[in-house]
Image (spheres, rainbow, N blue to C red):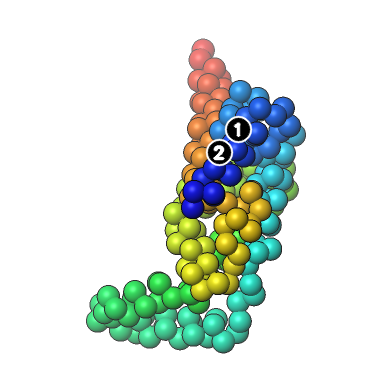
Amino acid sequence: MRFTGISLIIGLIACSLTHAQSAWDLVFREQLDWTSRAHRLTLSRDLLDRITLLESNLPTLSERDVQWVTQLEARIERLGDDATSSQRGRLYLSRQYQHRTLLEHTQRMRDELGCVQSATTTHDEMLCWGRVAVELLDGERIDVAIETLRDHRMIPRPREMPLKTLNPSIWYGEFGRGIVEYLLLPYLESQQSQSSQLSQP
């Protein structure tokens, strides 16, 4: 854990000192130009690279594990309020459920970042960015999934992972907040300003 923290700090410092555009512009925002479509696309591509790297270190979910999760979910749903905490906990803490959770997350992230890149209007693009932020701001849940798989030796240890994939609960949250604060809010404020100007006599 200490090695991971040091690596993250070194990575943050390196990113803050470089002039190359990357997702860290959402944190070290001095160079961020939210009005630039080209810059926003650069951010989306860097985030996609990070998600792809994370995904490349995940094993394939077996059909047997898919069936196990599906069957247990169906059983709990049938029981409804009669389902015990133990049954719900068994599902949530299982490697099968957490494995599926992580794969579903990476798929949604890829879909929403693809949505950003294919959007034809700024309004549509910002809706996609909003959904990206929702995923990123749920980083602690993703951390649970990663740690569960790591406990079962299904993914590499932190020091064997690429720097871009370390500590999702840290960089997910930072990037998610950056999207909200430095992309979405400025966009909404600009729209409000335009509306106010149009409504003036």
Residue at screen point 55% across, 38% down: 9
Q: State the residue at coordinates (55%, 72%).
A: 153
Q: Residue at x 66, y 53 (%)?
A: 162
Residue linked to disc 1: 13
Residue 106 location (% of width, % of height): 60, 60
x, y percentage for residue 172? Answer: 53, 47
Q: Disc number at residue 130?
A: none
CA distance separating discs 2 and 1:
6 Å
Kind of residue at disc 1: Ile
Q: What is the three-letter code of the residue carrying label 2?
A: Ile
Is residue 6 something that shows in the picture? Answer: yes
Up-down: is 114 above or below 85? above
Mark 2, other Cα within 10 Å: few <14 / some 14–19 / many ≥20 = few
Task: Kindly state the secondary structure of the residue where label 2 is placed.
Answer: helix
Which residue is at the front of the view, 178 or 117?
Answer: 178
Circles 2 and 1 in contact, beta carbons < 8 Å: yes
Residue holding disc 2: 9
- Identify whether 64 is placed above or below 49: below
Horizontal side of residue 132 vs 52, given as left or right: left
